[in-house]
Amino acid sequence: MDYKDMKFKIWTGCDRGLCHKACGRQDKQLNTYDWLEDVPGNTDTTDLVEVQFKNTRKGYYHNVNNLELNKGDIVAVEANPGHDIGVVTLTGRLVKLQMKKNGAVKSPDDIKRVYRHAKEIDLQKYEEAKAREHATMIESRQIAKRLGLQMKIGDVEYQGDGNKAIFYYIADERVDFRQLIKDLAAAFHVRIEMKQIGARQEAGRIGGTGPCGRELCCTTWMKNFSSVSTTAARFQDISLNPTKLAGMCAKLKCCLNYEVDDYVESSRKLPSKEIHLQTMDAEYYLFKTDILNGKCTYSTDKRLAVNLETISAERAKEIIEMNRNGERPLSLLNNGKAKPDKKPIDLLAGADISRFDKDKTGRKGNNRSNNRNGNQRRNGNQDQQRRNEDRRQNPRNHGQEQRNSRPQRNGRQNNYRGNRQGEQGNQPPKPVNNNQNED
């Protein structure tokens, strides 16, 4: 089935206060939800309309011809010189509020007019001009590089009638592009306008998907860019990792400013990091905090996580007040009771420690020697067990065996005694026969 041949009927009615003209996003960026679209007489209050062009460029125009304009209509508007083609994105009362919010128009004389609804010939010229934008951007970059200019041309936008081209560029320093304008005008034969933008504006014009999985905020709804600093990350207790804090534009993410006010308000309820808690058993130091939940985790060591205890901010302030009065609670717990003694856990309980003695080399020679040594140890253990058993059954024989097993020592003692007796009686010592017991 060819979907081009199918005709879809769009229901123009409203349901529950919503209308497709108000919330329709179409294919344009920076969509504005017109919640006053269905209010009777909304478009009669003002003739101003908001028209959007390529990417995020918008303009405000007077509907001097009283055309019936709705959101999504393609119109031809006044330009300098010629005319431009854009899409109506907002009508009615909200247009004045948008102009005041964005500060797009400095004086009423700067507001131009809406000519007409775009005709077929206008759309053809518009498509032809848009088809030249990419090739023009590539060639303009080559010209700027040849001139040695420290700038980057990020995007090119042709006017609807093709008589003018806007070159969006990024530069860190001031650039003298007078010669560049002459070369571009000679190369493309159109009127040249140079417009400097920042890295955030470039990301908004190009578009993309952020790490959160949604379209970039600068592409969908953000119109004004506020400065973002690392202070916002410190308030939210976020690690200062440049790769995670940077967005698609290589700058700090704009979403760091979304919740910083809530974190600042919640952090005021937490105790200071410089204050230590004194208890009967130890001194605790603030280790980490859960800002939004109002929880504080304390450690008995300044730099390491030792004996961690998590308490509420109210309990911490209560202990601080007690320490100021010279009192010390038994513990950080809310009930004031001492912590139960934790018995050490034996990780090797019931484990076979002899498993470390097993040889895992897998060599045959080692296995044989290990088996031989193991057999010898087993035989020695069996002999020792037999001796112990005999010793228990015949203790007297065991004593006699011990005396008979030391004949040399007894002979030495007898010689010593004989020598002593010979010296006392002035008689030569009698020889002692050590082999008497053998007869």
Image: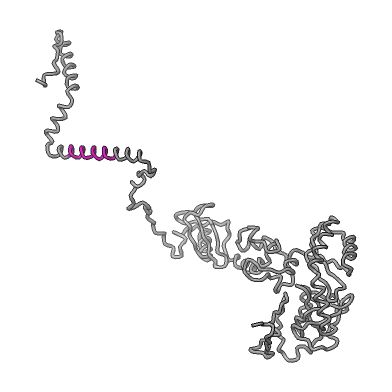
Left or right? Give the position of 264 relative to 57: left
Q: Is residue 418 above or below residue 219?
A: above
The quarter of the rendered structure image containing the N terminus is bottom right
Q: Quadrant of residue 372?
A: top left
Residue 69 position within the rendered picture, expressed as x and y whole percent measured from the top left: 78, 86
Residue 181 position within the rendered picture, expressed as x and y whole percent measured from the top left: 88, 63
Residue 380 position within the rendered picture, expressed as x and y whole percent measured from the top left: 24, 37
Residue 405 position within the rendered picture, expressed as x and y whole percent measured from the top left: 17, 27
Q: Residue furthest left?
A: 439
Q: Is residue 289 above or below residue 83?
A: above
Whether 312 is among the magenta residues is no
Nearer to the camera, 310 or 9: 9
Q: Is residue 50 above or below residue 308?
A: below
**Total marks placed:** 0
Q: Quadrant of residue 56?
A: bottom right
Left or right? Give the position of 239 relative to 348: right
Q: Which segment is the magenta one?
A: 373-388
Whether 381 is among the magenta residues is yes
Tell me the colour scheme of the image: one colour
Q: Quadrant of residue 12?
A: bottom right
The quarter of the rendered structure image containing the C terminus is top left
Please, what is the dominant secondary structure of the magenta stretch?
helix
